[in-house]
Amino acid sequence: MDLSIAGILALDGLTSGAVYALLALATVLVFAVTRVIFIPQGEFVAFGALTLALFQAGKVPGTVWFLLVLAVLAVLGDLWNGVRHHVPPRRLAIGAFRTLAWPVLASAVAVWAAPRNFPLPVQALLTLALVAPFGSLIYRLAYESLADASVLVLLIVSVGVHFALVGFGLFFFGAEGFRNPSFWDQRFSAGALSLSGQTLIIFAASIALIVALWLFFGRTLTGKALRATAVNRAGARLMGISSSAAGRLAFTMAAFIGALSGLLIGPTTTVFYDSGFLIGLKGFVAAVFGGLASYPLALVGALGVGLLESFGSFYASAFKEVIVFSSILPVLLWRSLRDPHGDEH
Amino acid sequence: MKLARTLIAAAVTLAAAGAALADINVGVSLSLTGPGSGLGLPMQNQFKLFPKEIAGEKVNLIILDDASDPGKGVSNARRFVTEDKVDLIIGSCLTPVAGAMTPVATEAKTVQLSASPVGGDSPWLFRLPQGNDVMAHAMVEHMKKQNVKTIGFLGYTDAYGELWLKALTPLLEKNGMKLVATERFARTDTSVTPQALKLTSANPDAIVVVASGSGAAMPQMGLVERGYKGKVYQTHAAATGDLMRIGGKAVEGTFVTSGPAVVGQQLPDSHPSKKVAIDFYTNYEKQFGPPNQFAGHSYDAAIALQKAVPIAKQKAKPGTPEFRAALRDAFETMGRTVFAHGVMNWTKDDHWGYTNETGVMLKVVDGKFVVEK
């Protein structure tokens, strides 16, 4: 191995690491606010990439109908609860309108726009608009009524949601994979390194999103409310912060980040209906580096996972996954020795 | 009410009588739903064209869906041998499902024609698809002609990759070629840059990519991106339009092995399967559009039966255990048979049976497969 090979490997590792970082941040965000270990995070990656691929093919993606069905189910659930608790019909109607407005609008635009072959950035925006609302709807349907259950119960629900989403993914997108066109087809070369425009976009988008999240949590009231919920749910509720609204927001952000990651990796690899799981799992490993609590540590972990994967595939490609997933063991050992958990779980 | 009951009774009696009259019962288990449905549905289409009569005996096809699920495959197989008392089981098109059905067929001493390359050495199991070594033979012969001396391997980290490596290694050694680098990747990998780096630094004359369907394009694009200029070979699992749909320009000039069934028109006149393959292709296309290789397996099952049943009938009557045993013996002794998928010669020791006349090399030219002459 010489320096140029090391450079290429490092670049490749950091590129994947940048995507894992986004997923790790989403995993930490969701866990901190709702204590849900969100295994299906990767499914949003596949949903995002494949929804865009179907737009590219001029078809209406199945995610459109899935979104509408979930929104209707959420409204029905609300109505059922509302009627049982004698909520005034006016408030019920307003609630239903709020739930339905965005999904119906986004779906209508998607159905209208699908056969018209708009430019790639427009379709990408539309994809984000379609996939991001899944977060809040899935939270409401699967997790909200269990908000006070133990981490283990929430984890079990996550496994179920994961399998359901993979199944729907197969139904909507088929078993064959897709590859999206690059957002920026330029290539730059510096010595042995060759940098594609898409790689730059991945770095830029990851950095921009991390900065945006940092500003959001540091400077905005909503961000501070989320942080308060993360620190102490009961306390935040006493301060008038709705923990279910915080959960919905956290999940929406997670879905948005997942879909964005899908758009970023779509042009660099072939994405299948079930590709999301392993990508999401690597984000999860990175999040564990940060103890599912620290954003900067998760970021470092993600870049580490990316590099480990890249150098691992170079030295022993057959054992790459073994290397990546075994790396979690020393980290867990170190974490449990450093701060042994008491009665939290 | 009474009339309805009488009618139902009559229908049941008739159905039972029909079953008793029907001479050869064939149980077919296919993945018509689930992830394997892309393989099972074309097979089912081809079964609609299955001969109604073989050697003067009526043929009854009982087609069940195994939902791409091994458990469902087992219960289908059980139903075939206990309730339908079939003379032959065909299926499934997925290896795990077919593998799960094998013990049931073996226990009931019923021949199983698997439409997927299942391993194992059951005396009742015969395979319709080509084994990897037959395909590897065609590939290595082509490499010899292209004067390839050193070879790199980039394959799935699963059974498919492993079986290909096992089939290739002895053939390469025998022909004086050298495997200089062996790299793996998983279907879910987002990048093969590190493996491509290692392969290109070894700089072999040719690289064999072992992957299937739309997953076959990404590794090759990784190689091209790293500036690999040598020849690239792909396996028969990659011989689908997905290779070009995803790979685009990067897969131009790739050599791909394939069975002859779906490229009949282009085969050289010397290829023994040419006539049969064209017959299969045109008949299928007329009714259902372009076929895939799995529809060809259904077609070949009919050819095998048409040759074996007359031999077996001399020994016993259909529907008896003796007939089932005779059918197996007939498959083992019927000798060289030309299928749409190549030339088959099952023997007592070899239930894979394809001869080296089978494999065809294709080349990607302008986004289409062209047979290498």
Image (cartoon, rainbow, N blue to C red):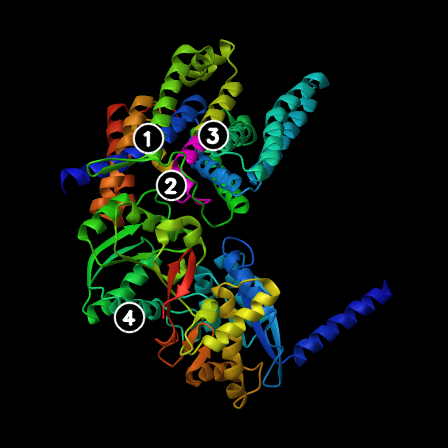
Where is mark 1, residue-wise?
Answer: A200
Q: Above or below — where is A218 with respect to A264?
A: above
Q: Which residues are magenta?
A: A258-277
**Circle 3 marks a residue in which chain?**
A
Where is mark 3, residue-wise?
Answer: A255
Give the Cα distance between marks 1 and 4. 44 Å
Give me the residue at 36% from left, 53% from top: B251
Q: Are marks 1 and 4 in contact (CB under 8 Å)?
A: no
At label 1, the amino acid type is Leu
At label 4, the amino acid type is Glu
Q: Above or below — where is A173 with respect to B83?
A: above
Give the Cα distance between marks 2 and 1. 23 Å
**Circle 1 marks a residue in which chain?**
A
Q: Which mark is residue B141?
A: 4
Image quarter for residue B235?
A: bottom left
Residues at marks 4 and 3 on the same chain: no
In the rendered structure, the answer to whether residue B76 lies left or right of residue A100 reads left
Residue extending furthest right? B2
Q: Who comes first in sequence, dot 2 or dot 1?
A: 1
A73 or A209, nearer to the observer: A209
Q: Quadrant of the C terminus of chain B?
A: bottom left
Answer whether residue B167 is magenta in the image.
no
At label 3, the amino acid type is Ala
Q: Above or below — where is B103 with respect to A167?
A: below
The answer to whether residue A118 of the structure is visible from this angle is yes
- Name the secondary structure under disc 4: helix
Where is mark 2, residue-wise?
Answer: A278
Residues at marks 2 and 4 on the same chain: no
Residue B66 x/y as whole percent: 54, 60
A155 or B118, nearer to the observer: B118
- Name the secondary structure under disc 1: helix
Q: Quadrant of the N terminus of chain B?
A: bottom right
